[in-house]
Image (cartoon, rainbow, N blue to C red):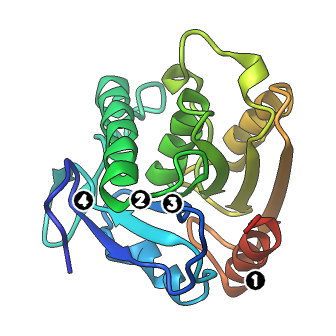
Amino acid sequence: MLLNKLSIKHIIKKPRILNKYPSPLFLMIHGYGSNENDLFSFQKDIPENFFIISIQGCYSFGSDKYSWYDIDFSNKDRFINIDQAKKTIEKISFFIDEAIKEYQLNKNQVWLCGFSQGAILSYAIAFKNPEKVKKVIALSGYLEKKLLPKKMNYSSYTDLEFFISHGKYDTICPINLVKKGINFIKNQKILSLQYKEYDSGHSLNSYNYQDIINWIKKNKSF
């Protein structure tokens, strides 16, 4: 059921396994032209300790089609509407605080899982909120430096872990952009980074999906 009680519409799956500590937040951020139900399909395989939230994009442009910012496919230099994207980063960061308070979650154990636009945003949100975000799953997206904080606190990223995957034949987000971002991330003194490529385009195949789930299970610390 789509919930409308916080600043961003969302759907949730509550943890079935509870312990004495607040549950970690697993936040899903879909891609351009999709909706909150897309990545939520992962929930059946994600460990049941997580409080899972999948959010709906800010902008609607068709039946069940949403985005987080405008894209100009004809202009490679201005592919992303930077101003819109920055506002969305602020909005999702605020939503994370809201959700932690509303659902009584662990404020120091936020996981982000984003596809395409959602991945691009996840990178920026993680570097903006390293005290909260500890794990990032970036799928078929790239790191856009224009969206990063103006002042990077390099000593704050030592707990950040990334799983990054990309299709070798992706024509929407070319793989060379992803590799540039990986080189940048490796220089930020993060805790760990796993990068994998797959024989796919701008999508996930079964091998990619299984590697995502395995990484989640391996890296959960509860």
Secondary element type, mark 4:
strand
Q: Residues within 10 Å of mark 1 (few under 14, many from 20)?
A: few
**Residue position marked by numbered label 1 in the rendering:** 207
Q: Nearer the viewer, mark 4 or mark 3?
A: 3
- Amino acid type at circle 4 is Tyr
Q: Is residue 99 above or below residue 82?
A: below
Work out whether mark 4 precedes mark 3 in sequence or the reverse, and give the earlier one. 3
Image quadrant containing the N terminus? bottom left
**Secondary structure state at the residue bearing disc 1:** helix
Res 143 visible:
yes
Q: Which mark is residue 25?
A: 3
Q: Give the residue at mark 4.
A: 66
Give, as a three-letter code, the residue at label 2. Answer: Gly
Residue 73: tell me if it is visible.
no
Ranked by sequence position, the earlier of labels 4 and 2 is 2
> Mark 2 = which residue?
31
Total residue callouts: 4
Dots 4 and 3: beta carbons under 8 Å? no
Dot 1 amino acid type: Tyr
Locate residue 195: give its quadrant.
bottom right
> Could you say whether the residue bearing mark 2 is in a helix, strand or loop?
loop
> Which mark sits nearer the N-terminus, 3 or 2?
3
Counting residues from the N terminus, which is met first, the one under dot 1 or under dot 4?
4
CA gap between label 1 and label 4 equals 27 Å
